[in-house]
Image (cartoon, grey):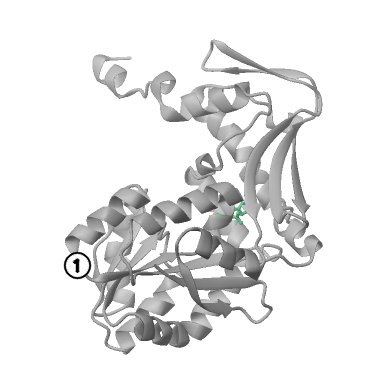
Amino acid sequence: MNATELLTVPCTKHSTFYADVIKGLSAPQKYLDSKYFYDATGDRLFQEIMRCEDYYPTRCEMDILSNQSAAISNVLGRHCRSFDVIELGAGDATKSIHLLQQLQQQHRDYTYYPIDISSNVIDLLEHTLPVEVPGLSIQGLNGEYMDMLLLAKDLSPKNKVVLFMGANIGNFTPDEALQFCRTLRAHLQPGDLLLTGFDLKKHPQVILNAYNDRQGITRAFNLNLLHRINRELGADFNTQQFDHYPMYDPSTGACKSYLVSKTTQQVHIAEDVVIGFRENELIYMEISQKYSLEETDHLAFASGFTPVARFFDRKKWFADCLWKA
Ligand code: AVI
């Protein structure tokens, strides 16, 4: 290794990823933070999940946006005369593009501010969206949601329509979701609007199947985090010694994914940390919280918003809820 290489080798032990992994795997109930699912392989697997038959939320929300964008933009216009659109975690904007196109057709004068933690995502959106939505004014914001919201407020005094789609709110526990919505409300002006995608409570088997798809993609998605720890933190997880175990509790709406250690085993991380697993010991991986409509309204009021409209897919499995600050 030469001097230049030495400078470019990431110091894993000082990374937040390392600290979070060690903290999670040393807790009495072991856990890993689901935000770490999304490395390059995780992104690809998540794209596959969204296309797979058993995982319905993406198709449901696409049904709403592709068929009801005209209705959504009319309601936005009724509640707010002039606004900019901000999207939290814009990704590839495949759903929101329908709304952006509709707003263009209605000659609304707005700027679209996609916010994403990935600069690649922002670069791609800035290049591709103006082609797909001719005339679109777009300014990507690369960073944390709340910091970028403040920046967008500085960039333009207009009211904001904030999009938080894709059932991402479900990856918070109900308490975290309340805290998140309260913080969001504190960053908005009276009259701003928030459109949030909620996956609704439905037949428990349908929900469980979505997180235990027959092709095993969700299983691979969960196990990929162990592979990622091996790759990036020099660990030696044997992923064949872990099972994917999702469970859904219809009484609380919590769908939780775990990995189960199939045997008593030890895993080494970054050479000097040893994590012991008992047979059948769990690693808590992710929550995907499901909501009733009453619960979405309750969340709105408890965080200082007023619910103003809801848009459903044909099956009424998913709701995009519009709240006013
Ligand atoms: C990103 N998020 C809304 C997905 C969900 O449904 O909770 C992540 C996911 N995990 C497994 N499948 C999909």
- The x and y percentages for residue 113 are 29, 64
Please state which of residues 96 and 6 is positioned toward the viewer in this rendering: 96
The image quadrant in which ligand 1 is located:
bottom right
Please state which of residues 16 and 305 is positioned toward the viewer in this rendering: 305
Residue 236 seen anywhere in this rendered image of the structure: no
Please state which of residues 21 and 53 is positioned toward the viewer in this rendering: 21
Is the residue at mark 1 in contact range of ligand 1, meaning its CB lies under 8 Å from it? no
Residue at the image position 73 percent from the left and 54 percent from the top: 252
Asked which secondary structure carries label 1, the reply is: loop
Above or below: residue 123 compared with residue 191: above
- The x and y percentages for residue 299 are 55, 61
As drawn, the residue found furthest toward the top would be: 272
Residue 317 seen anywhere in this rendered image of the structure: yes
In this image, 63 relative to 181: left or right? right
In this image, 42 relative to 115: left or right? right
Which residue is tagged 1?
Answer: 157
Classify residue 89 by image quadrant.
bottom left
Residue at the image position 71 percent from the left and 65 percent from the top: 201
- The x and y percentages for residue 40 are 47, 45
Classify residue 135 by image quadrant.
bottom left
Which image quadrant: the N terminus? top left
- The x and y percentages for residue 10 are 37, 24
